[in-house]
Amino acid sequence: MPAAAHVVSQNANPLETYGNFDLVKRFKLDFADIHVSKWKSRTSGLSVVHLDYDAPLVNGYFVVGTEIFNDSGCPHTLEHLVFMGSEKYPYKGIIDHLANRGFSNGTNAWTDTDHTAYTVSTAGEQGFLQLLPIYVDHILYPTLTKAGFVTEVHHIDGKGQDSGVVYSEMQGRENTSGDLMALRMQRLMNPPGSAYRSETGGLMEALRVLTVEQIRDYHHTYYVPHNLTLIVTGKLASGTASLLDVVQNQVEPSIVEHGQNKGPRPEGWKRPFVETPSADRKPLKTTLKETVEFPEKDESVGELQLGFLGPPPTAFLERKAIDILGLYLTSSAVAPLNKEYVEIENPMCTYIYFSEDTRATYVDLPVYVGSVPTEHLDTFDEKLKASLKRIADDGFDMDRMAMVIGRDERQLRSKLESSQGDTFSGNVITDSLYGSEDGKDLAPSMDEINMYTELKKWTSDQWAALLRKYYVDPPCIVVRGKPSGEMADRLDREEKARIAAQRERLGPAGIAECERLLEEAKKEHDKEIPTEILKSFPVPDVRSIAWIPVQSVQEKHGQKGRAPVIQSNNTELAKHIEQDGVPLPFFVQYDHVKSDFVTVHAYFSLEKVPARLRPLVSVYLSAFFSLPVKRSTGELLSHEEVVHRLDSDTVSYEVAVGVNGLFNDAIRVSIKVETGMYETAIQWLKDLVYGVQFDKERLAVNIAKIQQSLPEMKRDGDTVLGSVNSELLYDETYVPRMGSVVPMIDFIPKLAQQLQESPADVIKDLEEIRSCFTDPAGVRISVNGNILSLKEPRSTWARHFGKALPESELAHYRLASDMLSPVGKRPVKKAVVVNLPTIESAFVTHTAKGIQGWSHPEYPVLRVAIEVLNATESYLWRYIRGSGLAYGAHCSLDLEAGFISFTLYRSSNSIQAFKQAASVIKGLTDGSISLDETVLDAAKSSIVFGVAKSVSTPGRAALMSFVNQGLKGVSQNYNIELLEKYAHITKEDVIAALKKYFLPLFDSSTSVAVAVTAPGKADEVSEEFSKIGFEVERRTLQVEADELSGSDSEEDSDSDESR
């Protein structure tokens, strides 16, 4: 492949060694300052890959090839059990306690069809290198105890019901349309004897009979050093040598002790997938079609998946071409398939998405089609194949193809700037599984920029040949996902009958024994980690973190009635802007960072939009970039020309309510371009805001798309929870509430009808929304990126917005706290229980009054208290997830609305989880559960990681500078300055905060609750809520098919959903 020749090789001597390690490959990417080296130990066969580049974060991906030939779930259950302690560190969760001390927010992991990856990110290298040997000890030598299995994988509780963390997770997934269809596709695409047929997560039926012995056997086979690759991305002060030293001196001695020093390829070892029956993948002989039912009362729309076989995994140029082909066919409103199937008045689907999964021998090429009206399900695949054939026969629009390739290249460069070498972590994982063992495939797999150069030379005939070769000529597998109300009822009946039979089989004595085993297992996990072990892991120094410098300047005009912002370290930028014309009459903040790009963000206040028009705002925004536009020059562009030109001119563009979930009473329009296109971005901003033409046909298409996507949205428990919670806490002027799924189910069909009967009224309403939000007093502009490279950073705005935005007094933006419902203002006693047929586990949120305002004096202590509760392996994790009651549980703080909340995600027993959380908070406040100093240290250290991550790229650092100064009204580096305050928080401060703010969350007289749960559990949840003292309102969410025929608040919780 010619493109590979562009990688600069530095490997003159292929026999370079470092201690036990041989250099397999070393090279530098010629389009980015990233040095890659791959090493293999002669002693253990362990592989180490380092992507070396300057960055504040160091990331680790520790990858094991995991092949399984059944649905037992061994790979997934093992992934969970690895974190329960290791031979040298036999304490549950110690790895996360130590990670949290080392400027991290805990560890994480995922299990895919062909591998399990264990991950950690730290701010700076010290914590990372300290943690590495301990983490590898957990991976290679975990304790794998029976107690760990009981809580983490599966158990039967005191009510005779099945539970466990993995069980809860799979219960929430197994009968969803996506999982049911994917499993059927795997079975049809791969022959018997292939591991690609397996459900690696574990089917519930298999998890109920799985044993810890099976998992130990599985670990013994696959978790061996020669099947483990340690991938590290980021800067290590002493270079790759420091990494190899740690592995050689602190990891390999243990491998030798275990007798695993058998070199890179022990006798009898077969590389998973590549050298086993799974590699025997032959082209499909005939097209097979199957229908899979999934539980759903609303039977109006289904889903479709087509499976094709692609090129070999090392055919990198061809794989890149297939990726570009998918973008050409579906990436925007003017892409050929979207025009034909989606952007029409009665959409035949809401999206078509071409994907790729790397496999041995040949990659898989799945095509996903969403929200297909059930009457089209049986014929859609034939129509789609006919469309693809027609596109191949008619030839490609090469202007559009050039645009698609150019835009994808710009987006890769933009990603390289923000993620740097981490962009290629996926390539390295894939190479460890499928690449040549001599490392020859690694560089070509990363050489994407040069692939673009190659593909720009392709002709229409070459693209047509590619389309025919993989999607038109060969047979494929078609899996139709069909909604079934009957199946929803049947699953509910069957599960109740199964539980009843299980209770009968066990009898009272058997159930009591199950409960005893569970309590015993929990007790075993409660073994305290010796404080000296934790303290032996020093907390790094905050001064070791290199923050990205941001120069910031605010225009002083248009700021009557506003305290001047104090800005420093910006002399160079201030001078550059002052030299460019007179000051602007409106609010602009410039944030300069080193970058090849510049982004313009414009914020428009919605305060003047009347309440009756607020449900319409989300419809306006969904159509924003796909309507005709009259440009300032007088030129009228069709919606197709708008999309095509925007794609040609920009890196990305977006319209949304607010920023990062905050300031939801403002619309934000963002356009990112290369610095040379700065003026073009400003012209587009002006024309999209003021020049959009509300065309009836285009509006009808957009409304039809929303209408058709609603059934799919309301199948998701988390989406429904957010919507119902929003209805409970906010009034009807709160745009996220009005644009969420539950109100939309009612609003959208009525709007569609109104548009047909009186289009002028709908258009008049949209015009009114625009005239309200373009009021100059509510407009704020943010420019971030390489401003020092712009010739006219200021005067360009004067040219295009001088007339539109005359000087006016800058209005304050309304906050979420200004838009609370009566219940939101006084959250007491009320509970809403929603019955949702498509889920089997529960999603719950409890809310109470918290603190309001970003500079509230109690914020630092509450922030530390939240981290103490939420940290991986901390209190909520241990007592709720560790008891197998839910997949996730966390508290969060909403400073804008003034709420504090407790949320359960995919809970198998939400009432028990709630009671457990209440007893934990109570125990911490009355002293019966101790709050150790080491927990406090770890919480503060984790917050450091959260802050570092939030400003870890030039774009994030610049955005934070604007949000702090331009919206929150705090200082530029407020987040970093707070680190000083967190450092001084004491244990007593945290306990006082838990008493004052968190205990009320678990008392019905000072809180409200929303639970979205399976029909079979709704009665029990409602009864329990009533017993606790809530006044319960019951709701069932289902839209009848005939109704639909014809067609988030950011919470201040840095604890990511883990594992």
Image: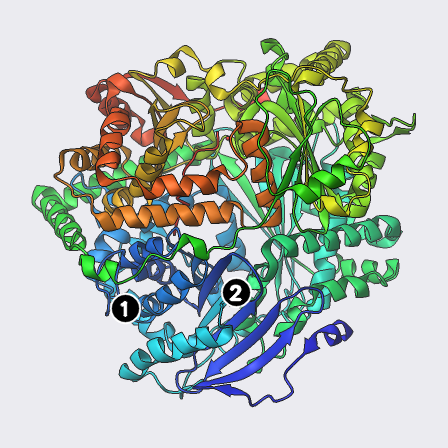
| Callout 2: SS | loop
Q: Residue at x 68, y 46 (%)?
A: 381
Q: Tell me, for residue 555, which label it has, or none.
A: none
- Residue 469 appears in the picture as rendered: no
Which residue position is annotated with label 2? 235
Q: Would you place residue 791 above or below residue 779 in this image?
A: below
- Outermost residue toward the right? 634
**Front residue of this view, candidates 461 and 78:** 78
Task: Identify the image quadrant of residue 453.
Answer: bottom right
Q: Residue at x 43, y 75 (%)?
A: 227
**Front residue of this view, candidates 296 and 678:** 678
- Residue 259 appears in the picture as rendered: yes
Q: Are marks 1 and 2 in contact (CB under 8 Å)?
A: no
Left or right placement of residue 1015 versus residue 281 in this view:
left
**Front residue of this view, candidates 225 and 115:** 225
Residue 790, image x and y in percent?
Answer: 78, 44
Give the mark, 1 or 2, whose residue is nearer the N terminus: 1
Q: Would you place residue 302 above or below residue 406 in this image?
A: above
Q: Nearer the viewer, mark 1 or mark 2?
A: 2
Residue 552, image x and y in percent?
Answer: 63, 39
Task: Identify the image quadrant of residue 475.
Answer: bottom right
> Circle 1: is it few (<14), some (14-19), or many (20+) Cα within 10 Å?
some
**Which quadrant is the N terminus positioned in?**
bottom right
Amino acid carrying mark 1 in the image? Arg
Residue 314, image x and y in percent?
Answer: 65, 72
Left or right placement of residue 387 versus residue 820 in this view:
right
Residue 1008, image x and y in percent?
Answer: 32, 20
Q: Residue at x 28, y 81 (%)?
A: 258
Amino acid carrying mark 2 in the image? Lys
Q: Tell me, for residue 216, which label it has, or none.
A: 1
| Callout 1: SS | helix
> Circle 2: is it few (<14), some (14-19), or many (20+) Cα within 10 Å?
many
